[in-house]
Amino acid sequence: MEKTISLYELSNDLLELMDIEDCEINEEVKSQIIEQIETMIEAKSENIIAVIKNYEATVNAIKEEEKRLATNRKVIENKVSRLKEYTKECLEKTGKKKVETKLGNISLRKKPVSVIIEDESLVPELYKTVKEVVTVDKNTIKDFLKKGMEVEGCRLSEEGYSLTIK
């Protein structure tokens, strides 16, 4: 079985070949080899694009299925909620506190006391708490840094590349 050459190996071979001095290898031979390696890199890249597009299509199909399942789950959860409320109302109407069956038991129990805020503006400050949320505005910081200004604890990153596949 023939071993295929990886894109990584092809890239390294191309770099090594370009570093070879012209006196060590005939220029015409070097050009032909570089052309062959570049053609192989294109073919490998095309295969990689196909695999990535296939994975992306699979991811999108899974996301759509997740949405469909989430919608179905919500429908069933709503049915359960309505059935529980219906059963509670029927038990309250008949004055029954408990029903025992072979499959399980249903019972009513008193809810704990809860507070209902009818008008929050009338509640004394003593009973209010302040929640402070701090966020960093990266866009503003980026604008300042691009203008040559310094922002303590921040720097611009121009490292690396992002891959675009169309």
Image (cartoon, helix red, strand yellow):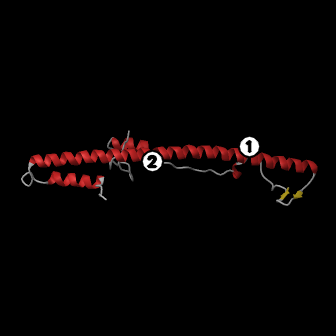
Front residue (pair 29, 24): 29
Residue linked to disc 1: 122
Instruction: Identify the amino acid type marked 2.
Output: Tyr
Front residue (pair 111, 12): 12
Labelled disc at residue 55: 2
Front residue (pair 59, 110): 59
Report which quarter residue 112 is drawn in: bottom right
Left/right of residue 164 with respect to residue 63 in the rendered view: left
Q: Does dot 1 land on a helix, a strand or a loop?
A: helix
Instruction: Identify the amino acid type marked 1.
Output: Leu
Quadrant where the N terminus is found in the figure: bottom left
Quadrant where the C terminus is found in the figure: top left
Question: Which percent across, then down, holds residue 20?
Answer: 13, 54
Left/right of residue 33 with respect to residue 136 in the rendered view: left
Q: Residue at x 71, y 48 (%)?
A: 77
Front residue (pair 11, 137): 11
Question: Which percent across, then down, holds residue 146?
Answer: 34, 42
Question: Which percent across, then down, holds residue 65?
Answer: 58, 45
Left/right of residue 104 with respect to residue 2 in the rendered view: right
Q: Residue at x 32, y 43 (%)?
A: 148
Is residue 162 something that shows in the picture? no
Foreground disc of the pair 1, 2:
2
